[in-house]
Image (tube, rainbow, N blue to C red):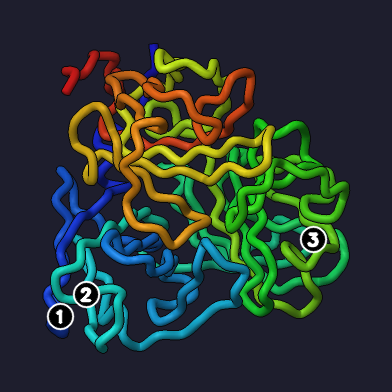
Amino acid sequence: MAYTTIDDPSAHFQTKIYTGDGNNNRAITNDGNSDLQPDFIWLKDRNVGFGHRLTDSTRGITKNLASETTGAEGTSTTQYASWNTDGFTLIYGGQQVPNYNGHTYVAWQWKANGGTTANNTDGATTSTVQANTDAGFSIVTYTGTGSATTLGHGLGVAPAMLIVKNRSTAVDWAVYHKDLTDAGYVLTLNSTDSQADSGTNRWNHTDPTSSVFSVGSGQQTNQNTNNMICYAFAEKQGYSKFGSYIGNGNADGPFVYTGFKPAFVLFKNSSNAGENWIMYDNKRDPHNEATLELFPNLVNTDYTGNAFDIDMLSNGFKHRGANGGSNGSNRTYIYMAFAEHPFTTSTGIPTTAR
């Protein structure tokens, strides 16, 4: 039975759905049990094929990256006016994102450390870290050296997943996950590629430790003099889960135990090329089956094909479709998931299934 020290996950992660009204200085208020001032917002327009927008309080709320492209960091003064104690305020400058009249948006939000950063010298190269050790999430920025090095992440436990982007140059995203074949392997967030053996190029063939993660000499993770960003995630029992499963190619698909009812799930076929990353959440789809998918590597709107459907259950998720993207026969998938509420509270009392 999973125990947790986070009885209210909404204090650290929330999904917000809102409809644009085309007005300036539009305040969006979260609706979780706890207030959440975001430090990392992943935003998507659900109505048109406009790209994902990833912004964080370390780089600043005018800076954005797009998960579906190789593009370098962009600057926009027409997205956020401020990030608030329980949400964010939008600027409307006639753009599709983030407040076009009549469009619906989804904003996935994580809390780090309220925008407060610190230099971290745990690694051979100094990094700038904004860490939420309670929830296992940190935002790490650093300057590439062009040769293998280590960088502090500030979590106190080994990260299970790293999402890294070169902010200065148009190159692929790099994703480390603990359940890939080994630390030489990498996934690409902006593509349908399967895991690839990068040797020492991305992670220097070294798993993260409780204090540092390693990068090789590749431009995706360590181009000399380039500005880099890493979103580091560590597993917290009953709040977050990073794992893998094998598909069975059947509409009665595998059940994946997480130890909580998921609020958000991201997964990827790691063994076979040609399959998208897939995202679910409990706000776009508050009832089972969850049928609305978004794809981090595409600009597409909500997809409703039932071949990908899942049930979000009190202690995990179960696949209800047979598709290579989520449940192909004998195919391997990695995932990350965050909780709506734990299966069991910090005092050992089972929560009521909802």
Q: Which mark is residue 22?
A: 1
**Counting residues from the N terminus, which is met first, the one under dot 1 or under dot 2?**
1
Can residue 54 be seen from the camera position used here? yes
Check the picture and name the quadrant holding the N terminus: top left
Mark 1 residue type: Gly
Task: Identify the residue shown where x is 16% and y is 85%.
Answer: 24
Relative depth, front residue between 92 and 30: 92
Relative depth, front residue between 301 and 150: 301
The image position of residue 171, as x and y in percent, is 69, 69
Above or below: residue 139 compared with residue 234: below
Work out how far the residue at label 1 is from the one at label 2, CA to CA, in angstroms.
5 Å
Question: Which of the two discs, 3 and 2, sits closer to the camera?
Answer: 2
Above or below: residue 343 compared with residue 114: above
Mark 3 residue type: Ala
**Counting residues from the N terminus, which is met first, the one under dot 3 or under dot 2?**
2
Task: Identify the residue shown where x is 69% and y is 33%.
Answer: 271
Task: Identify the residue shown where x is 70% and y is 34%.
Answer: 180
- The image quadrant of residue 100 is bottom left
Mark 1 surroundings within 10 Å by alpha-carbon count, few (fewer than 14), some (14 through 19), many (20 or more) = many
Q: Horizontal placement of 305 versus 190: left or right?
A: left
Work out how far the residue at label 3 is from the one at label 2, CA to CA, in angstroms.
43 Å
The image position of residue 119, as x and y in percent, is 60, 68
Mark 2 residue type: Asn
Q: Horizontal placement of 258 versus 33: left or right?
A: right
Q: Which residue is mark 2?
A: 99
Q: Which residue is mark 3?
A: 124
Check the picture and name the quadrant holding the C terminus: top left
> Is label 1 in contact with label 2 (beta carbons under 8 Å)?
yes
